[in-house]
Amino acid sequence: MYKLSLITGDGIGPELSESAISVLNTIHDKLDLKFDITKLSAGDKALSETGKSLPDETVDAIKRSDACMKAPVGESAADVIVVLRRMLDLYANIRPAKSYPHMPALRDDIDMVIVRENTEDLYAGKEFSLGDSAVALRIISESASKRIAKYAFESATQRDSMKKVTCVHKSNVMRVTDGLFAKACTEVSKDYPDVRFEQMYVDACAMNLIRQPEQFDVVVTTNLFGDILSDESSQVVGGLGMAPAANIGDNFALFEPVHGAAFDIAGKDIANPSSFLLSIKLMLDWLGNKHNDSKCLEVGAKLESAIFDLVKTGVKTRDIGGDNSTSEFTKQITDNL
């Protein structure tokens, strides 16, 4: 049995959490993969009730679990997810972008993943005032760059795809920091002769994600560039509602939908739960690989197929132009499972 922690979040977070629990309970009862789920509080509501957006008891419960799921939180999001990434050394942010039927993707053959370094760069938060200026330190280390590059190449070897890694940087301008990142990725590429390796400047990558998105397989990049490009790639395949995310370290991982808390539709039972449910698929894959559990991998594939088969029929939630509520959409997925 896997112990799972679940941050239920703010806005539409609690509704999506109930969708996730429903799917996990179906897997538990019908597919013989057992879970013990602990609901946790973090975010705006937790801040108002306890004075902390990430209460100590929530952190302790997360550390006792095998993996964590996080529904979207509100304005305090950075005080939750950024802190957890650093605290648990979740150095790889994984953002798949895949075309699904009846979604407004630019093409129907897009299947890429952006592997983003998750712990340093400008997001290290080293900012200060200097006279009438503000300064931010961009931290890029060889060790972190090689670690994320290795993750990207390993991912490419495991994907049923073109086996290609694209290193994205801006070393023609930021010659020291991005030069180091590019050099580290190049050195790691030598250990993977069966994986095609290319480099691309970030502005060219942003353009080519629109022009030729089908040409990308695995993109590895720094924290800030990865944050921007991964949101772009989500829109390329039809929007954030079908975009899952994982934050992965050597010993722990956290899984979340890409989108925010969407307070404007909270409580209306109309939010698309697919991003969160596809994040559960990523969690099952991670658990399966970490624990050599083929059952997790099998169930993860079944969950993605259940979502794919449902949207293939044209079923959508009301927030993206469909007729189904969140709970109705979830019920059809559990029936498919």
Image (tube, helix red, strand yellow):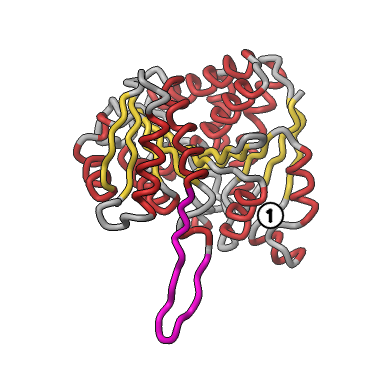
* Magenta span: 126-141
Q: On the image, numbered disc 1 is attached to which residue?
A: 42
Q: Nearer the viewer, residue 27 or 176?
A: 176
Q: Which residue is drawn at 50% across and 70% down?
A: 127
Quarter of the figure that contains the N terminus: top right
Residue 328 appears at what percent x and percent y?
54, 32
129 falls in the magenta region: yes
- For the residue pair 264 and 258, the one nearer the viewer reads as 258
Q: Can residue 270 be seen in this view?
A: no
Disc 1 residue type? Ala
* 306 in relation to 209, above or below: above
Residue 110 on image: x %, y %: 31, 29
Q: Residue 2 sits in which quadrant?
A: top right
User: Is residue 177 a member of the stretch shown in magenta?
Assistant: no
Percent position of residue 102, x then y: 33, 30
Q: Residue at x 73, y 43 (%)?
A: 62
Residue 75: tell me if it is visible: yes
Quadrant housing residue 336: top right
Residue placed furthest toward the left: 211
